[in-house]
Image (cartoon, grey):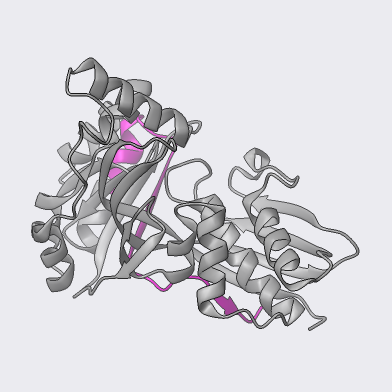
Amino acid sequence: MTRPVTARVPAKVNVQLAVGGLRPDGFHDLANVFLAVGLHDEVTAAPADTLRVTVEGADAGQVPLDHTNLAARAALALAERHGVAPGVHLHIVKDIPVAGGMAGGSADAAGALLACDALWGTGATRAELLEICAALGSDVPFSLVGGAALGRGRGELLTPLETGGTFHWVFAVADGGLSTPAVYRECDRLREASGAGASVADVPDPEPSPALLAALRTGDATALAAAVANDLQPAALSLRPALAGTLRAGADAGALASLVSGSGPTCAFLAKDAEGAQAVAGALAASGTCRTVRITSGPVPGARLVDV
């Protein structure tokens, strides 16, 4: 294919992030319940002599344009596997907050894979794309799959989950990002400091909450709110204490649940309905505790090609 190809990819929120102990390889086993939500990046792959990346949209200046960009790494991985020259111009239009715990970089990688596969005609199978995704990062496979899923291992081993309705969310975007590795290190440090220990021998194996899975299945927002949990939240709050004020502002505005999204620093608020989400968003915007506020809902599909 010689004309440009565009993929649209959603953000995610972790409605449960249960973190096991530190493994000898430096990773943690997870029980990670993902929900794809309706904030999207678009990745366009166009023929080019060499691999290059351009970015526009919110916080575009924070996104690397070299081969450390996860979308560039995705294109290189696909090209190497299929013996294709990695000549492609990847243009990313950002709407997912950058370094916000909503898997924006992972979404771009999944979008680049899908778009480059179509552009180059590599004919990669779904299983092959998921294998490349897993090698790129723990959140990348879910960006491809979307909907709702339980992630095991580092989060890359996915089991789709049934959902029975639409959940309404408000996201409060903080100034600046938080490093995911730094948040995990702080999680380990806090566990050590508590005297409980941080290794796999000290921390119970992470398991999904049956109540949470049931709430997703029935579409019950109130029941979901009672079950949401994020084991990384104490670490994110330790590194960024101001997030406590954001969480409090959303709770005071009537959010059913308030939690740090993934490794942060974006905070997620579950609302009863669309009207409730508007009220929470308005209060957060007026609170002075965050940079921007976004309203959306989920689940939504994963990465898919679009006509532009």
Residue ID at (44%, 28%)? 182
Where does the image place residue 151, in percent across and percent down from the top left? Answer: 33, 59
Residue ID at (63%, 58%)? 93
Where does the image place residue 103, in percent across and percent down from the top left? Answer: 47, 51
Q: Which residues lie in the magenta part?
A: 281-308
In the orientation shown, which residue stands out farthest toward the right?
49
Residue 291 is a magenta residue: yes
**In this image, 45 relative to 145: left or right?**
right
**Which image quarter: residue 299?**
bottom left
Q: Is residue 41 visible?
A: no
Where does the image place residue 70, in percent across and percent down from the top left? Answer: 62, 51
- Whether 140 is drawn above or below 27: the answer is below
- Whether 64 is drawn above or below 158: the answer is above
Quadrant holding the C terminus: bottom right
**Which image quarter: residue 190?**
top left
157 or 14: nearer the eye? 157
Residue ID at (49%, 68%)? 144
Quadrant holding the N terminus: bottom right
**Which image quarter: residue 233?**
top left
71 or 63: nearer the eye? 71
Residue 254 is a magenta residue: no
Q: Is residue 229 visible?
A: yes
Report how many numbered discs are placed on residues in the image: 0
**In this image, 20 relative to 183: left or right?**
left
100 or 214: nearer the eye? 214
Residue ID at (32%, 56%)? 152
277 or 239: nearer the eye? 239
